[in-house]
Amino acid sequence: MSRKTPRDPCDHRIVLDGDSVPARIWQMVVRGQKVLDLGAGSGAISRMLVERKGCRLTALELNDSRAQRLRGFCDRVIQEDLNDPTWVEKILKVNYDYILLG
């Protein structure tokens, strides 16, 4: 009996020409821009923007395993709780072209 390798949650197909939220983000974000992803989650959208549009991405994520995964492709990962207002202090010195909140 063969054992399946767990699937990477970032590795799923996103339809880019539809009307879904990921498709709208893809269509809106311009190549090479600075993006802040608040609550980046699995990182599927972040990874797509980094790898296919060359964006400079900062991700804010509380979950330990998700934050670790994001460190593999994001320029910066801030591991903080969005409910704690002090996270804002960690992003004030950078001007972002886009801020995603998912």
Image (tube, rainbow, N blue to C red):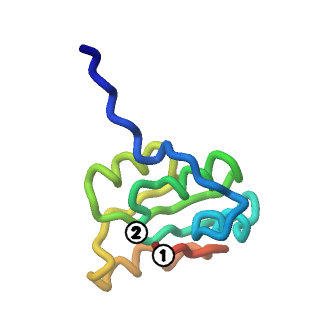
Q: Residue furthest front?
A: 1
Q: Residue at x 71, y 53 (%)?
A: 53
Q: Which residue is mark 1?
A: 101
Q: Residues within 10 Å of mark 2 (few under 14, many from 20)?
A: many
Q: Position of residue 66 (x, y in %)?
A: 34, 53
Residue 37 lies, with reference to residue 6, above or below; the image says below
**Residue 67 sits in which quadrant?**
bottom left
User: Is residue 84 left or right of 76 when viewed as pictured?
Assistant: left
Residue drawn where x is 54% and y is 57% of the image: 46
Amino acid residing under circle 2: Gly
* Callout 2: SS: loop
The residue most toward the bottom is 85
Is 82 above or below relative to 5? below
Q: Which residue is mark 2?
A: 39
Rendering coords of residue 25 (x, y %): 64, 68
- Quarter of the picture containing the N terminus is top left
Q: Name the residue nearer the viewer: 96 or 98.
A: 98
Residue 15: percent from left, percent from top: 64, 55
Name which residue lies at 41% across and 55% down: 42
Q: Residues within 10 Å of mark 1 (few under 14, many from 20)?
A: few
Q: CA distance from mark 2 to mark 1?
A: 6 Å
The reply to whether discs 2 and 1 touch (Cβ–Cβ < 8 Å) is yes
Q: How many marks?
A: 2
Say the numbered circle drawn on residue 71. Answer: none
**Residue 22 against residue 42 in the figure, above or below:** below
Q: Nearer the viewer, residue 57 or 30?
A: 30
- Of callouts 2 and 1, which one flags the residue occurring earlier in the amino acid sequence? 2
Q: Amino acid at mark 1?
A: Leu
